[in-house]
Amino acid sequence: MKDSNKNKHYIVRLSLSLAVASFLFSSCGSSGIDDVYLKDIDIQTDYTVQVVDDAVLNSVLISPECSGYEEKGSGYYTLTGCSEKPKTILADGGYTTVDDTNVSMGFPLILNTTMMGETNLYTTTPLTTLLASVNTPSELNEIRAKLGFSTIEDMFKDSDQTRELQQMLNGFFIDAKNNGIGLDQFSDFTKDFRTMLNKANGNTALDVMRDAKTKFRADFTANRSKYLNKYGVVFGGFIMSDNFNSDPKAFLKNLETKYNDNSKIVFSGFIFDDIIGTGSAKYRSDANITIKDLYDNTFLELNGTNRWIMADSYGNYIAKIDPTKIVENHSYFLQGRVENNESKEIILKSLLTGKEILSKFKTNLNSSDIPDLTISNVTSAKAIVLEKQNKLSSSTDDIIEAKKNLESTNMQI
């Protein structure tokens, strides 16, 4: 029997439901779909395309059931060469626009189509991403009730009801990624957040989301070692941040300004002391951060004019560097000068190579890209061992290999 789904094309909407959106179906009457999105597309069944003027542009679309995709413009994409109806759709990267500010995306947006009703339109949003790993209709219904949606299907649509909610969630995901929560941790991260969401209260969906973040913070404070073991020390600085309480649109714009600069490499990371034997960690808000080029023992300019910057109250630092100052075959000490409990100055450091930095070159590098952007007594010990082994003057390839060897042997010193 002929497979009626073979080589179907599916049209997907990537949307953040931004406040700037105007719904063309409403404003332009019921004439509906612009034929440009259906022209010359081999579709065996009719598919409805929702057209709105907010968009996620330049994403890479992936679905296991499809062999490719085409970007159609204005946030519309066509999945091509599909052997069957897509079960999971992932949209990686891209950007959206908030009040004329282009906001880079964080974690990939995900849609699990098996949890939604029959539809010809797929809308992939931060909310569908939060729901992607939900396993039961009952949990989906609990979240629906908690956020005030009338039906489960409404959570998978682009509507007025979801605009600020989508912005807030998108900012939450962007902030998590830029603070070093890795892609391999993202599924656990969303599950943990949904647990807090089901315990949260509020009169609106935004209030519920903010209360969920507050409960997340309280649970982290009460169960610090559990979260540090699962996510690493970066989680503390992220979860203690108050950014989530700001206006969702302002939150997104502030994140873009904070973490991205087209003319600079932006390092975002943490500095902390792991107090041996207690399982606790102290974020070093008193640290001043420098980057030292070991080739000539000079310090790079950070954020335009200074040779040092201060970490914030949670040990988070952001350093913006001229990319032309990073040399591939040079090595660098990322250093934090702090005082210990006896008011004596100590230096925590991490060893980086120009090759590591440039091989991952983009405007923003964080701890999920280069773990050694988290400065600690562990990275300091690695640097000290390599210094004793006279590796600092070695080639960058040898240094990278030596760092891997230390990590693979759990750094038995």
Image (cartoon, rainbow, N blue to C red):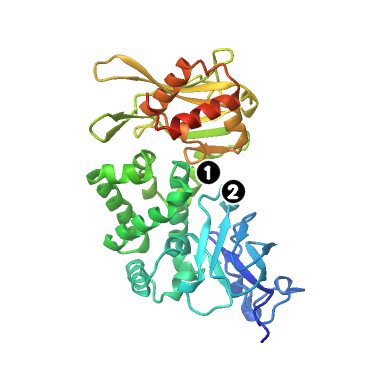
Quadrant that contains the N terminus? bottom right
Name the residue that disc number 2 marks.
Answer: 102
Identity of the residue drawn at 36% across and 63% down? 205
Q: Residues within 10 Å of mark 2 (few under 14, many from 20)?
A: some
**Amino acid type assigned to the residue bearing label 1 in the image:** Glu
Q: Which mark is residue 314?
A: none
Q: Would residue 391 appear left or right of 79 to someone viewing this image?
A: left
Q: Would residue 196 appear left or right of 124 to someone viewing this image?
A: left
Q: Is residue 394 above or below residue 371?
A: above
Give residue 79's quadrant in the image. Answer: bottom right
Looking at the picture, tell me which residue is in the foreground, 167 or 329: 329
Quadrant that contains the C terminus? top left
Identity of the residue drawn at 45% across and 34% down? 408
Name the residue that disc number 1 marks.
Answer: 256
Q: Secondary structure at mark 2?
A: strand
Visible residue check, residue 314: yes
Q: Is residue 215 above or below residue 112?
A: above
